[in-house]
């Protein structure tokens, strides 16, 4: 009888250890899944911001780039988007990017609405440095520095630069 009790205790101990191991594996896989989802969301935010930046640069008026470009700020004119109603409206937008603390902000307004406050959009947070520089003869270099993701640099061809 004592041998049967010993075998039963050993079997229960092994079962408990296997259950603890399985629980730990599931816990780690859930945490990993959440970390991957968080990273994918952050990457999507960066991709969206870089897409907006690149669209602005592609449609930029090359003559409007000048001394307004420096670390943490850039402004230029962008050819506007046609009116969906085909009505008359300015086709030039004034675009400004700048850091407000650690937030990368995009402001835009049409020449017609120069007296109104610009439309403002926070593109990214947790940005330490933002730089736009001309990479002559045909491109603009955009550089973002973030503690969470590091340095991202994009070179975008600007037609007519």
Image (spheres, rainbow, N blue to C red):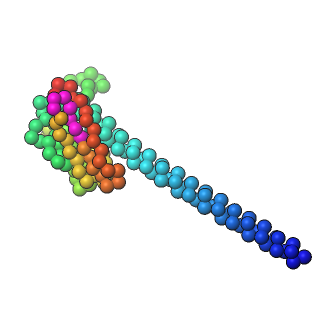
Tell me the residue at 24%/40% (across/down).
142
Q: Residue furthest top?
A: 86
Let me know if residue 129 appears in the view: yes
Position of residue 10 relative to residue 111, above or below, is: below
Question: Residue 23: within the magenta?
Answer: no
Tell me the residue at 14%/45% (across/down).
70
User: Could you say which is closer to the camera, residue 123 or residue 7?
Assistant: 7
Let me know if residue 93 appears in the view: no
Image quarter of the C terminus: top left
Q: Position of residue 88 (x, y in %)?
A: 21, 24
Q: Residue furthest left?
A: 67
Q: Residue furthest bottom?
A: 2
Image quarter of the N terminus: bottom right
Position of residue 45 relative to residue 158, above or below, is: below
Q: Residue furthest front?
A: 3
Residue 77 left/right relative to 152: left
User: Could you say which is closer to the camera, residue 62 or residue 121?
Assistant: 62
The boundaries of the magenta stretch are 136-142
Q: Position of residue 60 (x, y in %)?
A: 20, 31
């Amino acid at each position: 009888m004592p041998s049967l009790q010993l075998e039963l205790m050993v079997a229960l101990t092994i079962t408990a250890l296997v259950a603890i191991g399985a629980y730990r594996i599931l816990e780690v896989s859930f945490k990993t899944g959440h970390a991957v989802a968080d990273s994918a969301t952050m990457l999507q935010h960066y991709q969206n911001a870089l897409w907006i930046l690149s669209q602005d640069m592609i449609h930029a008026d090359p003559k409007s780039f000048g001394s307004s470009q420096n670390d943490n700020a850039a402004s230029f004119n962008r050819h506007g988007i046609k009116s969906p109603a085909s009505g008359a409206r300015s086709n030039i937008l004034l675009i400004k990017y700048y850091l407000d603390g650690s937030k990368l902000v995009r402001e835009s307004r049409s020449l017609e609405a120069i007296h109104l406050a610009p439309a403002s959009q926070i593109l990214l947070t947790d940005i330490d440095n933002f730089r736009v520089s001309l990479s002559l003869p045909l491109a603009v270099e955009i550089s973002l520095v973030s503690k969470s993701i590091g340095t991202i640099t994009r070179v975008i061809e600007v037609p007519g630069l």
